[in-house]
Amino acid sequence: MENCIFCKIAKGEIPCVKIWEDKSYLAFLDVQPVSAGHTLLIPKKHTDYLFDINSKEYLELFLKAKDLASLLKSKILPKRIGIVVEGFGVAHAHIHLIPINNPGDMDSKNAKKTSAADLQKVADKILKD
C-alpha cells in the first residue's frame, strides 16, 4: 500500500532497528516501546486486518512470533513476553511482542518515544551471541 508506514519500512524506504527478517516477514523495535525490547512483527505483504491473512501466512506469522518471543525472553530476561494485536495504530497487520514482568506492563500509556541510539543498544543486546 502506497502510504503505509510499515510497507515503507519493509521496503527499506524508512529506517528501522531490525531484529529479524526473512523474505516474507520483518521484526523491528517499536520506536515508542512500552518496555525495552518491544518488537513489532509484520508480514511484508500488506494486509490491513490480521484476520484477513490467509491461514498459511497467519500460522507462519504466529510461529515467527513464538520464535521471536523465545529470543526476546532469553536476551531481555523478563518473566513473560506478552502479545498485543489491535490494529488501530497502523492499518497493516502486525503483532506487538512486549517483554513484561507484571500484567500492567503492557499498558500503552507506558509507551515512550525512544532515540535510535537507545533502540540500537537494545537491539545489540538481543542480537548478541
Image: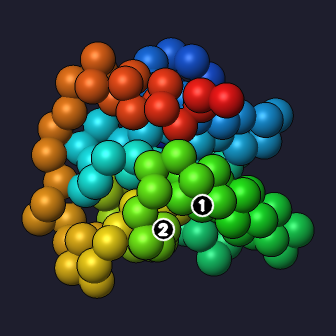
Percent position of residue 10, x then y = 60, 30
Percent position of residue 66, x then y = 69, 65
* Colour mapping used in the image: rainbow
Amino acid tagged 1:
Ala
Left or right side of 81 for 59 = right
Q: Is residue 34 positioned above or below 50 on the image?
A: above
Q: Is residue 9 positioned above or below 108 on the image?
A: above
**Residue displayed at 70% across by 34% down:** 21
**Residue displayed at 44% across by 18% down:** 15
Task: Count numbered badges in the picture.
Answer: 2
Is residue 106 visible in the rendered structure shown here? Answer: yes
Quadrant in the picture for residue 62: bottom right
Percent position of residue 42, x then y = 59, 49
Left or right side of 20 for 48 = left
The N terminus lies in which quarter of the figure?
Answer: top right
Q: CA distance from mark 1 to mark 2?
A: 6 Å
Q: Which mark is residue 89?
A: none
Q: Is residue 102 positioned above or below 21 on the image?
A: below
Residue behind mark 1: 69
Residues at badges 1 and 2 in contact (C-beta under 8 Å)? yes
The answer to which of 104 and 128 lies nearer the viewer is: 128
Amino acid tagged 2:
Ile
Local crowd at mark 2 within 10 Å, few (<14), some, or many (≥20)?
A: many
Is residue 14 visible in the rendered structure shown here? Answer: no
Left or right side of 108 for 91 = right
Q: Which element carries disc 2, helix, strand or loop?
A: strand
**Residue displayed at 36% across by 43% down:** 30
Q: Earlier in the sequence, mark 1 or mark 2?
A: 1
Residue behind mark 2: 81
The C terminus lies in which quarter of the figure?
Answer: top right
Percent position of residue 63, x then y = 77, 65
